[in-house]
Image (spheres, helix red, strand yellow):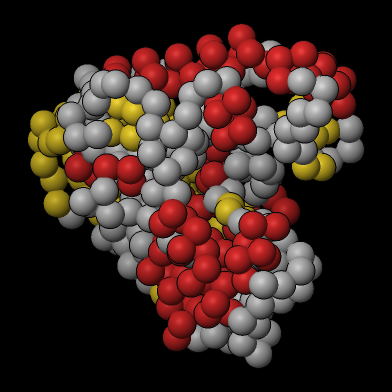
Amino acid sequence: MQELHDAPLAPLTTLRIGGPAARLVTAATDADIVAVVRAADEAGEPLLVVGGGSNLVIGDEGFPGTVLRIATKGFALDGTRLTLAAGEVWSEAVDRVVLDHGLAGIEFLAGIPGSAGATPVQNVGAYGQEVADTVTEVVAYDREARETVTLAAVDCGFGYRHSRFKAAPDRYVVLRVTFALEDAAGASTPVRYAEAARALGVEPGERAELGAARETVLKLRSGKGMVLDPEDHDTWSAGSFFTNPVLTDAEHAAFLDRVQRRLGAEARPPAFPAGEGRVKTSAAWLIDQAGFTKGYGSGPARLSSKHTLALTNRGAATAADLLALAREIQSGVHAAFGVTLINEPVMIGTSL
């Protein structure tokens, strides 16, 4: 294990924002992870677990306790059953699965930054695919029971960008994740997302060539500033800052009324089924239609010039700068459409 004191945390996040940790420990084995967590719990010390830092906003004052950076490695493939250590780089694991082994199931999640252990926490998803589609089990250290547990997918409480792990953020530390992939003879899983289907030249529900599906997703993500590039400030973000709102039928009807009064009777905001009596709409559409267009802002924190869902650090932004912009957008969307946007990244030492 490596241990540092008064260690900067901004370099460990894709936003490059946040104050220092009182103590930063990097653990490369499951045993070391568990030992650090147990020691912090026994001492009553605050603990923050960090993987790839891609879905994290750390406050400017930093973190007053121990920050545990998970750096475990492990890529094990048994037929179509894939087990990843929590510290594996997610985008690299997807590339290996698709390019080296020709397996489908996570190809539309190519290019997503962060670590494998974070994927079930957020139920990471993109372009019509989410990890809940393929996760079979998660091995985690349960801080309440003080033991390592194995949770089947059915027990993980997966929902839209949600899970049992996200609902109880101080209870579980993910150690390994297992996925059931598919050998589809060089084909992708059925393409669910209309934008991806158009780019691939197939109809929704059809399959595409596996490598082409990965490459297409990378191009689409790059065009939106969603593939990390240290030279491109549009990628200095936490990805999508707000989740797509899910409305009840009654809320959706009221929302449509406000949209049409503001934009005209022909206005048709995006709408997707989200379970019985519920409709999901687009946060990006709401932000844009409320007047916050690409590149909005004049300070060190601005909307991406490529995608309105990404709040970016133009090089010298603080957490206060970023959250001031987030609050302005949140307030403006609510005033225009009566919908409250919810942040997707985890907030540490700060909040909207």
- Residue drawn at x 30%, y 38% as measured from the top left: 15
Please determine whether, in this image, residue 206 is positioned above or below residue 292: below
Residue farthest toward the left in the current orientation of the protein: 5
Please determine whether, in this image, residue 348 is positioned above or below residue 28: above
Residue 253, visible in the rendered structure: yes
Q: Nearer the viewer, residue 102 or 67?
A: 102
121 with respect to 96 (left or right): right
Residue 275 position, x and y percent, is 83, 41
- Residue drawn at x 43%, y 74% as measured from the top left: 95
Please determine whether, in this image, residue 211 is positioned above or below residue 319: below
Residue 137 position, x and y percent, is 61, 61
Residue 187 position, x and y percent, is 65, 82
- Residue drawn at x 38%, y 69% as measured from the top left: 92
124 with respect to 282 (left or right): left
249 with respect to 161 (left or right): right
Residue 189 position, x and y percent, is 68, 73
Residue farthest toward the bottom in the current orientation of the protein: 185
| Quarter occupied by residue 25 | top left
Residue 164, visible in the rendered structure: no
Location of the C terminus by quadrant is top left
Residue farthest toward the top in the current orientation of the protein: 335
| Quarter occupied by residue 36 | top left
